[in-house]
Amino acid sequence: MLPGRDGTGLAICRDCAGIARSFFCRRCGHEGLLVGDKLCERCTLTDRLTTVLDDGTGRPRAELLPLLEKLRLTDTPHNGLTWLAKPGTTELLTALATGTIAISHDALAAHPAWRKATYLRELLITCGILAPIDKQLMLFQRWLTTQLADIADAEHRALVQRFATWNELRRLRHKAEQAPLTPATVRVSRERVRQAAALLTWLDSSGHTLTTCPQADLDSWLAANPQTRKPATAFLRWAGQTAVTPRRRLTRAPLPAATIQPRRQQHALINTLVTADDWPLRERLVALLVLLYAQPLSRITRLRRTDITIIGPDVFIRLGDPPAPLPPPLDGMTRQLLEHRNTYRGPNANTDWLFPGKCPEQPIRPRTLNNRFSTLGIPIQLGRTTALRELLHTTPSPVVASMLGIHPDTTARI
């Protein structure tokens, strides 16, 4: 700790500055900021956690001891104290400790302060107190409960619930068994449920039902706003397969032509990202992976440190098969990111994610990055489409699809 300053403003130690006050914790002897009663931040955090996790016997609840240990041993005890000071945090922890709220996924999912409960739930999973569960699946189930409650018509609500349970939840659970769900995958299911409800509302206002609606009227409704209403076809397909309604003829609306930005503008943006040292390294590296390798944010955020391979002077990134080489200066930026990964503190200090987020054992969210790029004026989606078009001009489509891990249909459409 360097609490003093010399004549030039340089930080110096207590003795050199002639400061008489002691900054040593009276319990553990650590020199640092003393919060109260001459205790350091870590000892203060330990005491407060011990109090809020008391099960009524004067001791922390045994099942929650791993949580106490993880929180008190964090690299940033100040952040732990800040978290405890937020409204509702100590009340939620005490409710778990005393049994007012069960230590279970269902109990935390039903908590009204769902964001706070979700964060704590992820901590409990990280500590091994709760069994692992797919976060995106969990959020979809919570969203579905709210969405169904907003459907006023009881028959419509029951039908949408059947569709969501047996088609969308079944699909998501199957995908979650193969790999963690991405926000984009869950977004598809949400739109399908929304448009199923919208279709039923339109049918009701038009005096039709799923069975009696003329095919021409249904086609007109779908064609009026094809991009928005396209997800409703999943509901119609399910309804036909389950004999809810006769099978319908579903015509696929043509996809709009891909929009790209001028090559000069794309190259100028890449040059800016390479030279803008005042921009955060993380944002620069992510944007370059989009603009050079046509990677979607949903995939970049799932990269792990093990996806980077360094062999002598060469750096490779595993996007598909085989790993793709990173040219200068992208290789140096990646090395720099790996070297500075220990600057990421809190619950994700030791995670394997290349771009860790704020939630325990979770990467940064694509939406967070997308909002950041919007602020910086970087057209991510347009840049990705342009990058993919340029790659396909010089490399066969199957090679691009394999090396970059992009679906062949996507490369064929571009």
Image: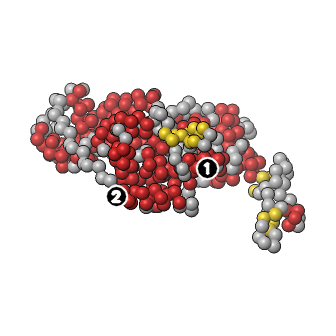
Binning the other alpha carbons within 10 Å of mark 1 as few (below 14), some (14 to 19) or many (20 upward) gives few
**Residue 300 image point, x, y percent:** 48, 44
- Please tell me how many numbered marks the rendered image carries: 2
22 vs 196: above or below: below
**Residue 230 image point, x, y percent:** 25, 42
Q: Residue at x 26, y 35 (%)?
A: 235
Where does label 2 land, which residue?
262
Disc 2 to disc 1: CB gap under 8 Å: no
**Is residue 37 something one can see in this rendering?**
no
269 vs 175: above or below: below
Residue type of the residue flagged with mark 1: Gln
**Quarter residue 123 falls in:** top right
Where does label 1 land, which residue?
336
The secondary structure type at the circle numbered 2 is loop
**Residue 372 image point, x, y percent:** 48, 56
Image quadrant in which the N terminus is located: bottom right
Which residue occupies the foreground of this view, 272 or 255?
Answer: 272
Residue type of the residue flagged with mark 2: Pro
Say whether residue 353 is left or right of residue 22: left
**Quarter residue 404 falls in:** top left
Say whether residue 138 is left or right of residue 166: right
Image quadrant in which the C terminus is located: top left
**Is residue 342 something one can see in this rendering?**
yes
